[in-house]
Image (cartoon, coloured by chain):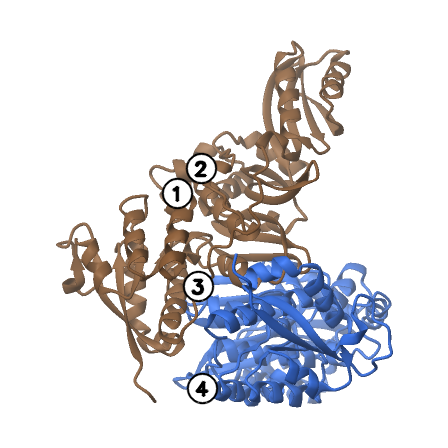
Chain colours: A blue, B brown
Amino acid sequence: MAQKQDVKIGLLGAGTVGLQVARILHDQQQELAARAGANLVLSAVAVRDTSKVREGLDQSLLTTDIDAVINSADLVIELMGGLEPARSAMLKALEAGKTVVTGNKAVLAQYGPELYETAARTDANLYFEAAVAGAVPVVYGLRESLTGDRINKVLGIVNGTTNYILDQMTTHGWSYEQALHQAQELGYAEADPSADVGGRDAAAKCAILASLAFHTRVNLEDVPVKGITEVSAQDIKQATESGYAVKLLARAERVIVEGEEQIALGVEPTLVPQSHPLASITGPYNAIVLETEFAGRLMFYGAGAGGAPTASAVLSDVVAGANHLVSGGHAPRESVYAALPICEPGRVETRRQVRLEVADRIEMMAEIAKIYAVGGVSIASLTQSPTETVPTEATLVISTHRAQNSQHDGITAALAKSPIVHKIASEMSIE
Amino acid sequence: MAQKQDVKIGLLGAGTVGLQVARILHDQQQELAARAGANLVLSAVAVRDTSKVREGLDQSLLTTDIDAVINSADLVIELMGGLEPARSAMLKALEAGKTVVTGNKAVLAQYGPELYETAARTDANLYFEAAVAGAVPVVYGLRESLTGDRINKVLGIVNGTTNYILDQMTTHGWSYEQALHQAQELGYAEADPSADVGGRDAAAKCAILASLAFHTRVNLEDVPVKGITEVSAQDIKQATESGYAVKLLARAERVIVEGEEQIALGVEPTLVPQSHPLASITGPYNAIVLETEFAGRLMFYGAGAGGAPTASAVLSDVVAGANHLVSGGHAPRESVYAALPICEPGRVETRRQVRLEVADRIEMMAEIAKIYAVGGVSIASLTQSPTETVPTEATLVISTHRAQNSQHDGITAALAKSPIVHKIASEMSIE
């Protein structure tokens, strides 16, 4: 057998995922070489503190000098996280024509175009399977394997932390705070959980998926975000009773607005009918549903985070990148030929469910119905039940037909002003 | 913008999928060109009868001359189905260095190595996403996007016809014959359903998936097959009552036999616990679960057949193939470096559930237990209930722990000989 070429790999960052990547590169050397058609040789590892002992990692490879790691490598794996110095390091590597593999959704969602342009200009390759849904190969799916189809909608549970929290609230009837606390104890949520529970992490992934699906530049700021911090035990109970699961969904959809094709985007807690494949995704898992013109509905499911699954995604990209280095071809280039406009959030159409605490008076229903009629939003169903604690109050759950978000918001404003409405207890979109 | 190169496409076969492919090539010309980086030009179509009018297909492209189509094309799409002349045509095209896209699982499962070797020798590219599970990108997943991981197990519902039939039997309590009849009426089963219901179609896909997952040559004959024709309404009822769904599963698993790594294979009706993600796959859908070393459990789900989904898979391969033709790189080569031995079917370990009709006599239980003890198979659970029609009979449902299939078969033989056992009503593996 012919001697295989070496591909020198520089690793930036040696946290949980980085260490795992280094370990697999070492342990599975031969299998990886057989698949890549090249020997994958870890040549240097950039860390903040070289004195810290990292089990299974050759101490002599460590350096604090990011540039030196980039210069010594054919292929750079960026696993530092955060915006800087990750962004600059990737730009430098791409400028030098090096292959870059990253799992950094924050940089991609914010500075993706800059990275893509640099890669295209220097004919370098950029891979990022690990940036969305861990090892679930949805980036490959969109970038490479569904290129003969036309994606109409991407709907995903792309944040395991929030899915775990919502799942625990559903199973145990817990409050958000109780479920968050438990998720933190078990390591499913970070000490500062704000990027996850606030929806920003999901929004970054939404932007990346939308870019790939619709061949259009989509940035983090294009995605309206609502996190799960205001979802109450009562909301979940109500949802379960009406046959829904509450999921933090990232949505990107091709819509027609006044005859023009646009992209509607959003991340928010959503009522998902129990019969929908995403309703049964429990625990810290991720799942992405693609609705396509020809293939119909496809779903990808798996672990969305964690050291090993993320390392799996990184290594797949490394194998692909190394293979391209030694036998030609390249990663798919950023494809923005469609350049669809982003639909203004207020014009995005959704169905909505609102739960109100209202004065239990005879004219109440008529008043509420009038607010919807004036606002031009059609009611699909309306359920009234006595409020448990206050005898003069009733709880009203209203589900609407599709309407523009601005119309829904108009209704909400009108409801808030009505003396009959004591409280708008919750508001959620319905999938 | 620079003028794009043309890639000439020859289509072999213009049935449902072929026509759909031709239509999409025409209707989505610009989008496909943008993604492929080349104009995809349909240059000729080989059919058996050129006089038949095919809507949406330019009559002047039709010919009965397969060789002429191959010669005129850069990329050949084979959609004739069956073994010959499909095999010869693909070999001829690959010999001439043409790119070949096929959905022909029969040829791949039987003559895959011949095709792969020819492609490697002439540096031609062979793509076959459509051969397994329609547009569900599991071939891409295994061939390209999970190359950094290690697959331990592939478990799939890869035949939509049988899944539909089993699903209808479960939902309506129908017999196999009733459900088959309905599937035929609705076009989910063919007039001659034997390849589907007999399991051969699933076995071909199992061989293809196993080859990709384990980097080993696996042929159709390596896969022991049992179809669904003997599954009864009673079996399904029994399964449902014990918390299982009956699914025709294709299984390929890395196992250790006497210290050696081997591949265990099989297609058979299997009891799947309701909590398993494959249990909830209903209707004519396909789903494939991959259990990997690092990524854990992944699932791919979608429509496994039908003109549009299959056309989607074909066109994705066409885009990839055209892109490789104009900008370098190639399809993944067949990778058989692992060359694992196939585990002898008798040595494959499974759990099994057996339903018996037995004489309702006081010594019955002891007799049955003795047969299992002598055969060395450990019983996990045993349920006795009176047989509805015969007062002197009882029904016994026995679930075992894991044992080798040869041991299970030994038990079955012993049970068949026992005067206490009136009938072995069913036998199924448990996942």
Amino acid type at mark 3: Ala
Q: Residue at x 70, y 86 (%)?
A: A68
Q: Residues within 10 Å of mark 2 (few under 14, many from 20)?
A: many
Residue A345 drawn above or below residue B405 = below
Residue A305 percent across, percent down from the top left: 70, 68
Are dots 4 and 2 in contact, CB under 8 Å?
no
Amino acid type at mark 2: Val
Badge 1 and badge 2 in a common chain: yes
Mark 1 vs 3, N-terminal side: 1
Q: Chain of mark 4?
A: A
| Mark 2, secondary structure of its residue | helix
Q: What residue is pinned by disc 1?
A: B189
Q: What residue is pinned by disc 4?
A: A339
Judging depth in this view, the residue of A363 and B80 nearest the camera is B80
Task: Answer yes or no: is residue A276 visible.
Answer: no
Q: Is residue A349 left or right of residue B253?
A: left
C-alpha span from label 1 to label 2 = 9 Å
| Mark 4, secondary structure of its residue | loop
C-alpha span from label 3 to label 4 = 29 Å
C-alpha span from label 3 to label 2 = 33 Å
**1 vs 4, front mark:** 4
Mark 1 vs 2, N-terminal side: 1
Amino acid type at mark 4: Ala
The quadrant of the rendering that contains the C terminus of chain A is bottom right
Q: Which mark is residue B197?
A: 2
